[in-house]
Image (cartoon, rainbow, N blue to C red):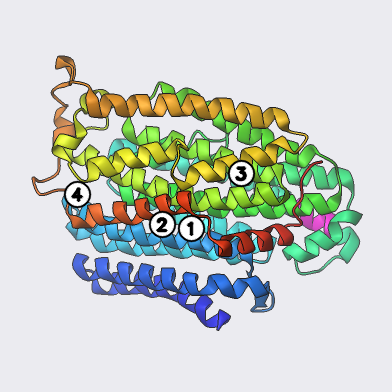
Amino acid sequence: MTIRLILIILLAPLAAVLGCLAVRRPRPAEFLNLAAAVAVFLATLRLLPETLNGPFYFWNDYLIVDALGTWALLCVSSVYLLGSIYAIGYMRILNVEVRLHRFYALYAGFGLTTLTSPLMNNAGVYWIAIELTTLVSTFLVCFELSRESIEAAWKYIVIVSAGISLALLGTILYYWGASLVLGPTYDMTWKALRTAAPHMNPAISTIAFFLVIVGFGTKVGLAPMHTWLPDAHSEGPTPVSVMLSGALLNTAMVGIARYLQISDAAQIGLLPRALVVVLGTASLAVAALFIVRQTNIKRLMAYSSIEHMGILALGFGFGGPLGVAGALYHMLNHSLCKSLMFFGAGNVMRVWGTKRIKAIRDVPRRLPVSGWLWLAGAVAITGAPPFGLFLSEIVILRAGLTTAFVWAAFLMALLLIVVFIGFLNHFRALYFSPIPDSHRDTSTSNKKTKAPADFPSVWCTLPMWLALIPLLVLGLWWPDFFMRFFAAVAAGLGAGGTP
């Protein structure tokens, strides 16, 4: 059963890629991609309980199906499905019908690479899978072919490739260090690295960990390696922004969690976790400062992604059952909420024909349904009750208070208050302030991007409901199955932490 589900998860988006390229027409391509997203999501839901009896290994141990990887699949498949629904309504208004089948082929390919990465059991092959996500998503970031999107794509591929190159160097160092223990040739699986870690040279282990964390931290968007993220997330089409924020970042965070497990096995002290905690705290600080002064609605969402990746890093860095559980719960809630927020930002941007916050006012009047959904998402993304992000942030804070990094927990609480005030202050202006005369007219280039009168359609509103309802449910009820699942992940990671 498990291998059949994995085949569905991997072959459905691959079939969509080939189908979109074969039909070369936009409408069939839309629904081929959507059908693949539905199949992947349903297969992932069925796979979740299976992995409680894992981990399972397939194809000469190159694939691992464990609780951590499957949880990442749940986040990716949820965002892939929501983004595929939204894309049908959103992409039709961009006047790119001739190229639309290519967009859906790339979108399904992006889904395939992000779904493949968490399943990789070989550290070297995992690095290749992460690099493939970069190559595919670069073409999606610049799909609209504007000057700004092309510049963002170049910045994205240059900075992320530089970071991933450091991760490759760290991977090579890990291989070399383990070869002194296991012999010159061996399968570089996560289990093999954990087995060799206690016997590796501590200096090699420390340097290798530093390189992989900086490398994959660049992909995650942790400060100070985050500079590509605001441009890429804000200039790509909204369905692409959703996948970048809610899916791609999580696949790289899985690598950080697995390498933390190896560093715990190496017994090299607090330094590895301290590095992750410092990067997480720095990301929160940078995001808070830029959120308060932001003037662009999509960049506001992008800096919010940096904030939440910082929170995830803190959860995994704190470790222990509470830290791991909070990080995993936050991963799913953030994927849902950030999808909702980018959908709302996409609707507003197209209706007003601008991304400038000062030129957008009285949102509910022109968007009576999606406008209020977007406001509910804004409350949720700041970690306010009764939504799921509130619970996950509280659990991570509790985890931090039981570790040697109490200072980081207090900083996290302070910075979350700053984000809450700054983020909702922008939405107060968007919803309840009059438009200044100096901002009533948008530029000619912005007017060309305005949507037709019947926008947003049900395709652009339905996924907002599908994201908000689970967010509310997960804020009011923490399912017992999730507790057992998080305990399995914590046990698999060794529940490393600091006393």
The answer to whether one can see residue 142 in this image is no
Locate residue 108 relative to residue 407 in the image: left or right.
left
Structural distance between the alpha carbons of marks 2 and 1: 6 Å
Residue at point 76%, 38% (across, down): 403
User: In the depicted view, which residue is nearer to us: 92 or 170?
Assistant: 92
User: Which of marks 2 and 3 precedes in the sequence?
Assistant: 2
Q: Which mark is residue 94?
A: 4
User: Which of marks 4 and 3 precedes in the sequence?
Assistant: 4
Residues at circles 3 and 1 in contact by the CB criterion of under 8 Å: no
Q: Dot 3 corresponds to which residue?
A: 395
Q: Dot 1 corresponds to which residue?
A: 75
Name the mark nearer the viewer: 3 or 1: 3
- Mark 1 falls on what kind of element? helix
Place of residue 378 in the rendered image (x, y in percent of width and height, measured from the top left): 37, 37
Q: Where is residue 214, by image quadrant?
A: top right
Give the amino acid type for the residue marked by disc 3 in the picture: Val
Residues at circles 3 and 2 in contact by the CB criterion of under 8 Å: no
- Mark 4 falls on what kind of element? helix
User: Which of marks 4 and 2 precedes in the sequence?
Assistant: 2
Locate residue 216 relative to residue 464 in the image: left or right.
right
Place of residue 377 in the rendered image (x, y in percent of width and height, measured from the top left): 36, 42
Name the mark nearer the viewer: 3 or 2: 3
The crowding category of the residue bearing disc 4, from other C-alpha atoms within 10 Å (few below 14, some 14 to 19, many at least 20), is some
Structural distance between the alpha carbons of marks 3 and 1: 19 Å
Q: Which mark is residue 79?
A: 2
Structural distance between the alpha carbons of marks 3 and 4: 42 Å
Q: Is residue 467 magenta?
A: no
Residues at circles 3 and 4 in contact by the CB criterion of under 8 Å: no
Structural distance between the alpha carbons of marks 2 and 4: 21 Å
Region in magenta: 172-178
